């Protein structure tokens, strides 16, 4: 079985699928990175992706334009994040509780909203038309490269945007005044405030950006990955993205690498599901088991480093 898994990993089709599976996790992981840099934990990624996926699809259906659908998903994601920020910054609500509320809204409220707007229950399969699905593109020159061309070309536009955003967000955080302010507010809001930075304004900007990124992940799920909205389609990707952000040490590149790891785990679970005499319940646990193992390794490594720092301070070495 291990030999078979190794053969699968290096197949062109499997590597292509990994990038496809990774994209929505990466959008949400980047959303978590931006929020965390401003000292806010966006726990509501799961619910934000569910609701933005629903409204992105509905906007695309009503306008018969996938582009307007993606824009609608981004707007909904931003508004949900701003709502969380409002309760956190204005009413001093615990942002973790605000995020849990958004997740609960996404879990149950999305089904109600779907029925209210369309009369459908559970999924939108009968509403799907080619105009509302995000198109795939073949990249000139790259598509003709042996092996790599079949892996890197032929994805939907949002897949490329997800990986491009890794670099753009790194530039934003480390090469722009706004990024400097976000990091300053996250590290020491008192110091940032003392030099004239509006802490509340920067936090609103960071949480809005986080919501917009999660909205892109939701649009990807309903308008490309699942080709329609259905109950439970996000399937824990928002929570997996939080793990990817933590394991990636809160950095865009680290989040991308850990998102690829979880994308690989999802892909392997789909492959293993096709094997005879393998329990589907066991297979469905693979991505989440990898998440738990990854977080355990991350926590162990972080604890070890903190202990070393403590010993050095005590000994003066």
Image (tube, grey):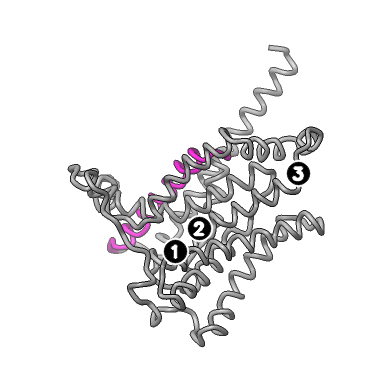
The residues colored magenta run 250-276
Q: Residues within 10 Å of mark 2 (few under 14, many from 20)?
A: many
Residue 9 at x, y percent in the picture? 29, 47
User: What separation in Å lies between label 3 and label 1 (alpha carbons)?
Assistant: 33 Å
Question: Which label sits on residue 221?
Answer: 1
Residue 67 at x, y percent in the picture? 43, 65
Query: Going 53% across and 49% down the picture, which residue do you hit?
Result: 29
The quadrant of the picture occupied by the C terminus is top right
Q: Which residue in the protein does label 2 denote?
A: 237
Q: Residue furthest bottom?
A: 119
Residue 237 at x, y percent in the picture? 50, 58
Q: Closer to us: mark 1 or mark 2? A: 1
Q: Predominant secondary structure in magenta?
A: helix
Q: Which residue in the protein does label 3 denote?
A: 199
Q: Residues within 10 Å of mark 1 (few under 14, many from 20)?
A: many
Secondary structure category for the residue under label 1: helix
Query: In this rendering, would 155 be left or right of 213?
Result: left
Q: Residue furthest top?
A: 317
* Whether residue 184 is situated above or below residue 31 in the rendered picture: above
Query: Going 38% across and 82% down the picture, which residue do you hit?
Result: 126
Residue 270 lies in the magenta-colored region: yes
Q: Residues within 10 Å of mark 3 (few under 14, many from 20)?
A: many
Viewer-proximal residue among 299 and 163: 163
Residue 40 at x, y percent in the picture? 68, 48
């Amino acid at each position: 079985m291990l030999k078979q898994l190794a053969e699968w990993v290096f197949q062109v089709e499997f590597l292509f699928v990994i990038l496809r599976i990774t994209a929505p996790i990466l959008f949400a992981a980047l959303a978590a990175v931006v929020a965390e840099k401003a000292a806010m934990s966006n726990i509501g990624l799961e619910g934000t992706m569910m609701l933005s996926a629903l409204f992105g699809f509905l906007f695309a259906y009503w306008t018969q334009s996938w582009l307007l659908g993606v824009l609608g998903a981004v707007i909904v994601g931003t508004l949900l994040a701003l709502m969380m920020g409002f309760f956190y910054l204005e009413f001093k609500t615990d942002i973790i509780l605000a995020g849990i509320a958004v997740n609960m809204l996404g879990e149950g409220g999305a089904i109600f909203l779907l029925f209210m707007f369309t009369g459908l229950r559970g999924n939108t399969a009968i509403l799907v038309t080619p105009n509302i699905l995000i198109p795939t593109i073949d990249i000139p020159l790259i598509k003709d490269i042996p092996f790599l061309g079949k892996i890197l070309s032929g994805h939907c536009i949002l897949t490329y945007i997800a990986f491009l955003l890794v670099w753009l967000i790194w530039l934003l955080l480390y090469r722009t005044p706004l990024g400097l302010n976000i990091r300053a507010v996250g590290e020491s809001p008192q110091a940032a405030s003392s030099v004239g930075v509006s802490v509340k304004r920067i936090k609103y900007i960071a949480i809005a950006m986080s919501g917009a990124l999660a909205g892109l992940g939701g649009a990807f799920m309903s308008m490309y990955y699942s080709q329609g909205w259905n109950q439970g389609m996000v399937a824990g990707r928002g929570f997996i993205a939080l793990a990817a952000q933590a394991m990636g040490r809160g950095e865009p590149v680290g989040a991308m690498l850990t998102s690829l790891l979880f994308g690989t785990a999802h892909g392997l679970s789909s492959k293993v599901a096709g094997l005879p005499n393998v329990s589907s319940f066991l297979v469905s646990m693979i991505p989440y088991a990898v998440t738990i193992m990854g977080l355990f390794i991350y926590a162990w490594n972080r604890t070890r480093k903190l202990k070393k720092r403590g010993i050095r301070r005590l000994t003066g070495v």
